[in-house]
Amino acid sequence: MVKPIFGYWDMRGYGEPIRFLLHYKKIDFEDKRYNVNTGDWLKDKFNLGLDFPNLPYYIEDDLRITQSTTIIQYLARKYGMDGKDERQKVRVSMAVLQLIDLRMALVDVIYNDHYEALKENFIKKIPDMLKQWDKFLGDRKYLAGDNITYVDFMAYDCIDMYRLFQENALDGCPNCKPT
């Protein structure tokens, strides 16, 4: 079997949770990173056999996948990290969609032309947003229960982005702090 290839920009972004999962499962893969300032991606984009040429992509033998959520869900199913029963799968699914909203809320501020005007008001909203996650996790070891699932990698990456954005973002959220 040929080593799978994961392609994404040379940054965290939507690719980092996928990288986390691949490393966690000790998958030997090629981490193809594209520099955003060069045309390397444009050289490869239409030559990889992707149905929807985009980053990130994952190539495993003749399987070629784009879209970060599709990639991580495929890997989670393949490696048994998508929830052990229906209750866990529901928690995972709900958390995935909520994380997309949480990530987009931050991205919409960070990449906004009016960043400085929006920043202060957004920072005031962060505690309430993250306290929901603290409560959702509760006394569970992982978001879905006792077993790690792919959404834990997504949550770690997203919540860490908030921590990097606002140093004390996790104050009052003991369950969300890395141990």
Image (cartoon, rainbow, N blue to C red):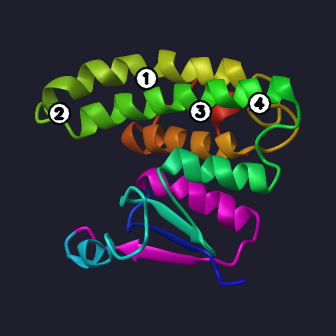
Q: Nearer the viewer, mark 1 or mark 4?
A: 4
Going from N to C along the chain, the mark reached first, 2 or 4, is: 4
Q: Where does the image place residue 169, in percent across and percent down from the top left?
A: 48, 31
Q: Which mark is residue 115?
A: 2
Q: Which residue is mark 1?
A: 126
Give the alpha-carbon distance from disc 4 to disc 3, as whole Å: 10 Å
Give the alpha-carbon distance from disc 2 to disc 3, as whole Å: 26 Å
Q: Where does the image place residue 164, in percent across and percent down from the top left?
A: 42, 45
Question: What's the residue type where badge 4 is placed?
Answer: Lys
Residue drawn at x 66%, y 29% is: 93
Q: Where does the image place residue 175, in percent across and percent down from the top left?
A: 70, 30
Q: Which residue is mark 3?
A: 96
Query: Does 43 sit left or right of 90 as displayed?
Result: left
Which element type, helix, strand or loop, lies under badge 1? helix
Q: Where does the image place residue 94, in percent across and percent down from the top left?
A: 64, 24
Residue drawn at x 24%, y 28% is: 119
Q: Is residue 170 visible?
A: no
Q: Which mark is residue 89?
A: 4
Q: Quadrant of residue 9?
A: bottom left
Going from N to C along the chain, the mark reached first, 1 or 3, is: 3
Q: Which residues are magenta?
A: 13-36
Query: Does 139 sit left or right of 167 as displayed?
Result: right
Residue drawn at x 69%, y 20% is: 136
Going from N to C along the chain, the mark reached first, 1 or 4, is: 4
Q: Which mark is residue 97?
A: none
Callout 2 touching callout 3 (CB < 8 Å): no
Question: What's the residue type where badge 1 is placed?
Answer: Ile
Q: How many marks?
A: 4
In this view, the residue farthest toward the bottom is: 2
Give the alpha-carbon distance from disc 1 to disc 4, as whole Å: 27 Å
Question: What's the residue type where badge 2 is placed?
Answer: Tyr
Residue drawn at x 20%, y 76% is: 38
